[in-house]
């Protein structure tokens, strides 16, 4: 990261804390590494992003239904899914500092250094070589690459590395009170398996016909070895996943459909298209026949925010084997090539998987703006404004009586009561109006309404728009409608 982007990122983190978006977890005990809590504004924003996703999946698609599965699952789930055997990352330890690193992270950091020095081609070649070696599980040559690139530990500054090894990322705990009888169970590392094990329950009870989807949001846990970049990589986080069950052979058509549909969802929030790109996976997970990431340009570079994976019939087939319960679907549509119904089969699955916290960070990074504002007397002023898409902003409307007397708070309270059942409003009567506007800018409130003495005469108020700072007089009776119209 260059100094400017590093400073911007630090400013976003401080801002998130100062304005009640994100706090380090259990901060009075100095925090817990890579675990965070959401404050009053943060929890509103997070909920709004979740609702926006949920609505777009389960309300706007009549062939997608939602579930809410438990975090704890039968331990065999994770044998069947492959997580017990495969959910690991290649890691390397520095023998001097005893620090452990994810191999792809330290090589990517080296590539970033090369890019900053203008050696763009070398950086690209290094990343391509890394991808090739990771895909081949060739850890010996990968270590040679680290040594040849003279990559050193950030703490000890030495290149005294161990061999590369795999570390499982699942957290385990005990179910049951007596240690001897207790079963080891895992905190789910992804929400998807709760959907797979409920496939038939949902299909039958909701009477779904293929193709159909099951959506879920919820916590996932990964013992990330190197947790970095604020809420980008956490040990406890939330996922929003949708598994779409399709007829075998049609998976690529649906993969392409969801690839486009999901990018459109991001852009529907008014986020800039030039900050997005697709990244096709070179190394496919054990369950996938195609996979890509939707990447966003964070201040620390293009990084994954969402994954689209064609998971074949791997999961359902494996659960069928381990549980000895058939996971088949009977398709009575007619296959034109045979003139008969498609019959029984295990469906294929295309999944879309997005991190809610990562989407939150994306929104914060895109929204955070420091502006210099020229004033009429030739001097300048400055403001920090969060240009959060209005649909998901923590508060939609701030209602501000100019003074705390003369009947203005009464008018403001009546407006508050009229609007607050439709969208979230914020009421404030303290401090000068300019200061109050700045505070609303800082938490991303798209509209402010000021009630002044003139309002008593003509029932008009001043509405101020966050992004343009434009102000205009509108009828008090029009405020609610105007805000609702703008929220779409
Ligand atoms: P990465 O390569 O960044 O570790 P991944 O490929 O393991 O991610 P997936 O298993 O595809 O991620 O998970 C789907 C989504 O869940 C990711 O796109 C990301 O948004 C989110 N996610 C995964 N791990 C974390 C984490 N540790 N903290 C926050 N979000 C995460």
Image: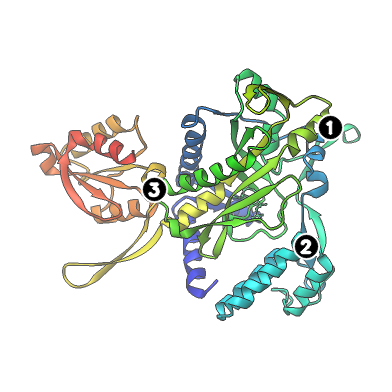
Residue hosting label 3: 389
Determine which quarter of the picture holds residue 282: bottom right
Task: In this rendered view, identify the residue nearer to me: 88 or 206.
Answer: 206
Assess disc 3: are there few (<14), some (14-19) or many (≥20) residues with their C-alpha within 10 Å of its C-alpha.
some
Q: Quadrant of the N terminus?
A: bottom right
**Is residue 126 something one can see in this rendering?**
yes
Q: Which residue is mark 2?
A: 91
Q: Using a 10 Å C-alpha cutoff, classify the residue at mark 1 as few (fewer than 14 neighbours), some (14 to 19) or many (20 or more).
A: some
Q: Is residue 239 in sight in this rendering?
A: no
In front of the other: 111 or 331: 331
* Foreground tag (3 vs 1): 1
Q: Marks 3/1: CA distance?
A: 45 Å
Q: Are marks 3 and 1 in contact (CB under 8 Å)?
A: no
Give the answer, above or below, for where 200 lies relative to 307. Answer: above
Q: Which circle's residue, 3 or 1, is located before the other in the chain?
A: 1
Mark closest to the chain's N terminus, 3 or 2: 2
Vertical relation: 146 (above or below) 21: below
Near-viewer residue (488 or 221): 488
Circle number at residue 193: none
SS category of the residue bearing label 3: loop
Distance in Å between CA atoms under marks 3 and 2:
39 Å
Q: SS at mark 2?
A: strand
Which disc, if any, is residue 322? 1
Distance from label 2 to label 1 (Cα)?
30 Å
Q: Give the x, y percent position of residue 71.
A: 69, 35
2 or 1: mark nearer the eye:
1
Q: Is residue 163 left or right of residue 43?
A: right
Q: Report the residue at 74% width, 44% height from top.
A: 287
What's the residue at 33%, 40% (across, down)?
Answer: 487
Q: Secondary structure at mark 1?
A: helix
């Amino acid at each position: 990261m260059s100094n400017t982007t590093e400073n911007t990122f630090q400013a976003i983190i401080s801002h998130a804390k100062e304005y009640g978006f994100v706090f380090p977890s259990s901060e009075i005990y100095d925090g817990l590494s890579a675990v965070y809590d959401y404050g009053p504004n943060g929890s509103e924003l997070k909920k709004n992003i979740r609702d926006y996703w949920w609505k777009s999946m389960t309300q706007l698609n009549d062939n997608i239904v939602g579930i809410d599965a438990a975090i704890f699952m039968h331990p065999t789930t994770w044998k069947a899914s492959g997580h017990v055997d495969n959910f690991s990352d290649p890691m390397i330890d520095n023998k001097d500092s005893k620090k452990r690193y994810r191999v792809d992270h330290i090589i990517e950091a080296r590539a970033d250094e090369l890019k900053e020095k203008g050696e763009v081609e070398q950086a690209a070649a290094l990343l391509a070589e890394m991808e090739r070696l990771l895909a081949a599980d060739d850890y010996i040559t990968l270590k040679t690459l680290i040594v040849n690139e003279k990559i050193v530990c950030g703490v000890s500054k030495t290149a005294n590395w161990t061999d590369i090894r795999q570390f499982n990322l699942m957290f385990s705990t005990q179910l049951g009170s007596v240690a001897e009888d207790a079963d080891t169970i895992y905190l789910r590392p992804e929400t998807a398996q709760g959907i797979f094990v409920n496939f038939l329950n949902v299909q039958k009870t909701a009477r779904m016909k293929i193709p159909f989807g099951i959506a879920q949001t919820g916590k996932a846990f990964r013992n990330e070895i190197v947790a970095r970049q604020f809420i980008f990589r956490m040990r406890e986080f939330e996922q929003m996943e949708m598994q779409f069950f399709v007829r075998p052979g049609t998976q690529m058509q649906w993969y392409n459909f969801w690839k486009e549909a999901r990018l459109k969802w991001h852009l529907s929030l008014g986020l800039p298209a030039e900050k997005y790109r697709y990244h096709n996976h070179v190394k496919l997970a054990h369950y996938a026949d195609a996979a890509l990431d939707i990447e966003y340009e964070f201040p620390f570079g293009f990084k994954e925010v969402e994954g689209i994976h064609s998971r074949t019939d791997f999961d359902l087939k494996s659960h069928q084997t381990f549980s000895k319960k058939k996971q088949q679907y009977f398709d009575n549509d007619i296959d034109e090539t045979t003139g008969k119904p498609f019959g029984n089969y295990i469906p294929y699955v295309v999944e879309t998987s997005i991190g809610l916290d990562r989407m939150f960070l994306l929104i914060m990074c895109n929204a955070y703006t420091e502006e210099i504002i020229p004033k009429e007397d030739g001097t300048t002023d400055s403001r920090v404004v969060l240009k959060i898409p209005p649909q998901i902003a923590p508060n939609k409307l701030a209602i501000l009586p100019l003074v705390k007397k003369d009947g203005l708070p009464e008018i403001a309270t009546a407006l508050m009561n009229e609007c607050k059942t439709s969208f979230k409003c914020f009421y404030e009567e303290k401090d000068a109006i300019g200061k109050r506007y700045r505070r609303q800018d800082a938490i991303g409130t798209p509209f402010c309404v000021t009630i002044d003495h003139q309002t008593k005469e003509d029932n008009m108020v001043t509405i101020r728009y966050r992004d343009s700072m434009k102000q205009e007089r509108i009828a008090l009776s029009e405020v609610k409608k105007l805000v609702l119209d703008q929220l779409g």
